[in-house]
């Protein structure tokens, strides 16, 4: 298990939410003082498919989910403190069975 992201300092937070899958996934865009873009969000129970343009790193802050990366035959379980990388121009499935998953996504 890794270190859980507890706070982001010196950032600008966009107040308009990014809402996906009929409010199943909600995030806010965060811009760091160096111009790096991140999203900070919640995933409600359900199964969701996301596409990526740029490579991404998803850090799980709270909760538990299962993830299946494109071209992979199996699902991997992630808990608070875990992270996974998604290649650019790819896709992944994420499933939350119970509770909420809180995450920070960094675009690499």
Image: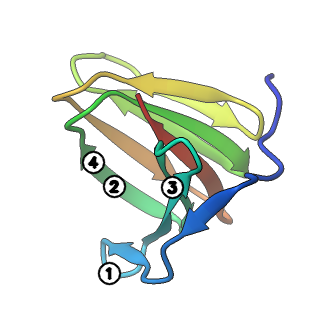
Quarter of the picture containing the C terminus is top left
Horizontal and vertical percent position of residue 30: 53, 59
State yes or no: discs 2 and 4 in contact (Cβ < 8 Å). yes
- First in sequence: mark 1 or mark 3? 1
Inter-mark Cα distance, 3 to 4: 21 Å
Asked if residue 72 is positioned above or below residue 81 in the image, the reply reads above
Question: Dot 2 surroundings within 10 Å: few (below 14), some, or many (20 or more)?
Answer: some
Residue at 63%, 33% (x, y): give it: 78
Secondary structure state at the residue bearing disc 1:
loop
- First in sequence: mark 3 or mark 4? 3
Q: Nearer the viewer, mark 1 or mark 3?
A: 3
Inter-mark Cα distance, 4 to 1: 14 Å
What residue is disc 2 on? 48
Q: Which mark is residue 31?
A: 3
Q: Nearer the viewer, mark 3 or mark 2?
A: 3
State yes or no: discs 3 and 2 in contact (Cβ < 8 Å). no
Work out whether residue 71 or residue 36 is closer to the camera in this orientation and state it.
Answer: 36
Q: Is residue 70 left or right of residue 28?
A: left
- First in sequence: mark 1 or mark 2? 1
Secondary structure state at the residue bearing disc 2:
strand
Q: Nearer the viewer, mark 3 or mark 4?
A: 3
Residue at 26%, 32% (x, y): give it: 54
Q: Find residue 59 and report its image quarter.
A: top right
């Amino acid at each position: 298990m890794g270190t859980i992201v507890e706070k982001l300092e010196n950032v600008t937070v966009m107040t308009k939410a990014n809402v996906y899958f009929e409010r199943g996934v909600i995030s806010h865009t965060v811009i760091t003082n160096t111009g790096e873009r991140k999203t900070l969000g919640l995933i409600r129970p359900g199964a969701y498919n996301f596409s990526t343009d740029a490579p991404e790193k998803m850090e799980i802050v709270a909760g538990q989910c299962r993830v299946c990366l494109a071209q992979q035959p199996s699902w991997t379980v992630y808990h608070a403190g875990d992270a996974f990388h998604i290649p650019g121009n790819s896709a992944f499935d994420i499933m939350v069975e119970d509770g909420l998953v809180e995450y920070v996504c960094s675009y690499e």
